[in-house]
Image (spheres, coloured by chain):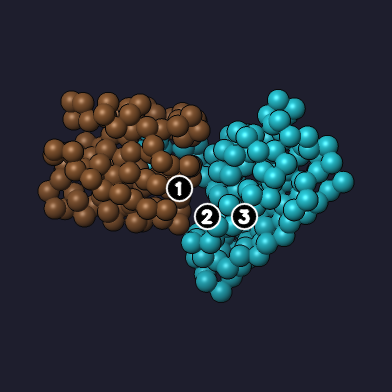
Chain colours: A cyan, B brown
């Protein structure tokens, strides 16, 4: 059984916290206390939305960001798509090198890749798909039947 | 989400309540810079009541630390929970900041 949640947000960074809270509330209904969900998915989703609004949509208030979340068993997949022209994720430098660690930006994609099990971009580079897999030990809840979102 | 500013002798303590993310990072930056411009030089950011931080929040801390050092001051961080410490360790920012287990520990020797 799969369940899906779809949201469309205005391109306003003030909506990010509320949107992430909303998605997390729906996902944690079945797996509360799962640290991997509370930390990894929450931060990954926040980073993806920030990138979409600030860089993908270039802070254009006329554009929108689409969030699609699918919960299937112990796997949560979130696809975040902006209306920008995209970018090349392979060109993002490592923010942990001595030269980059003092920079104020450039950690978003690194955090996504560090915290999620899979991070993939579409060919255009305007849509990122995040996959989080919860192991049996991650949560006291049983996700076998999926979660109603 | 809110930032509570208190003074502990000559140290400005900013408590972050809720989240430090892209949507409110400028508020923290403005709060600290106003204190810096008014002559304050010693700062502690207390994360005891903070749920999570994103990369924009980390970035504003790096920026503030740099600006405070340029003025001869110092910024310390306090009370990071296990999740927040994980973020600092992943990004290696734990090597860039003085991180104390508590506000009291951060204030010692500052």
Disc assigned to residue A12:
none
Q: Where is residue A47 in the image (x, y as percent from the top left)?
A: 55, 48
Query: Disc 1 on helix, strand or loop?
Result: strand
- For the residues marked 3 and 1, what is the alpha-carbon distance in whole angstroms? 15 Å
Task: Count the numbered circles shown.
Answer: 3
| Disc 1 and disc 2 on one polypeptide chain | no
Q: State which chain disc 3 sits on.
A: A
Q: Which quarter of the picture shows residue A146?
A: top right
User: What residue lies at 52% left-to-right and 55% top-to-bottom?
Assistant: A17
Quick check: can you spot residue B16? yes
Q: Name the residue under label 1.
A: B19
The numbered mark, 3 or 2, whose residue comes first in the sequence reads: 2
Q: Are the residues at dot 3 and dot 1 in contact (C-beta closer than 8 Å)?
A: no
**Considering depth in this image, is A56 or B24 the residue closer to the camera?**
B24
Disc assigned to residue A22:
3
Q: In this view, does A29 lie to the left or right of A9?
A: right
**Considering depth in this image, is A123 or A109 the residue closer to the camera?**
A109
Query: Disc 3 on helix, strand or loop?
Result: helix
Q: Indicate whether A17 appears above or below B70.
A: below
Label 3 CA crowd tier, 10 Å (few <14, some 14–19, many 20+) = few
Q: Which quarter of the picture shows residue B42?
A: top left
Of badges 3 and 2, nearer the viewer stands 3
Quick check: can you spot residue A98? no
Q: Where is residue A121 in the image (x, y as percent from the top left)?
A: 68, 49
User: What residue lies at 26% left-to-right and 48% top-to-bottom?
Assistant: B5
- For the residues marked 1 and 2, what is the alpha-carbon distance in whole angstroms? 8 Å
Disc assigned to residue A17:
2
Q: Where is residue A91 in the image (x, y as percent from the top left)?
A: 56, 45
């Amino acid at each position: 059984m799969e369940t899906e949640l779809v949201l469309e947000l205005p391109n306003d960074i003030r909506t990010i916290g509320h949107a992430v809270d909303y998605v997390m509330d729906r996902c944690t209904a079945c797996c509360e206390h799962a640290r991997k969900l509370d930390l990894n998915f929450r931060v990954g989703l926040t980073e993806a939305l920030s990138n979409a609004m600030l860089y993908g949509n270039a802070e254009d208030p006329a554009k929108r960001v689409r969030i699609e979340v699918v919960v299937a068993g112990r796997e949560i997949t979130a696809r975040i798509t902006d209306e920008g022209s995209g970018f090349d994720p392979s060109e993002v430098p490592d923010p942990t090198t001595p030269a980059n660690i003092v920079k104020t930006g450039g950690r978003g994609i690194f955090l996504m890749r560090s915290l999620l099990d899979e991070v993939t971009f579409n060919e255009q580079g305007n849509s990122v798909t995040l996959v989080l897999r919860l192991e049996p030990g991650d949560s006291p809840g049983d996700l076998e039947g999926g979660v109603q979102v | 989400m809110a930032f509570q500013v208190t003074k502990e002798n000559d140290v400005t303590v900013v408590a972050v309540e809720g989240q430090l993310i892209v949507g409110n990072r400028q508020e923290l930056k403005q709060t600290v810079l106003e204190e810096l411009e008014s002559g304050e030089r010693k700062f502690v950011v207390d994360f005891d009541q903070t749920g999570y931080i994103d990369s924009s929040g980390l970035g504003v801390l790096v920026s503030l630390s740099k600006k405070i050092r340029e003025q001869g001051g110092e910024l310390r961080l306090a009370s990071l929970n296990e999740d927040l410490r994980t973020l600092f360790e992943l990004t290696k920012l734990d090597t860039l900041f003085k991180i104390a287990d508590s506000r009291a520990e951060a204030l010692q020797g500052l």
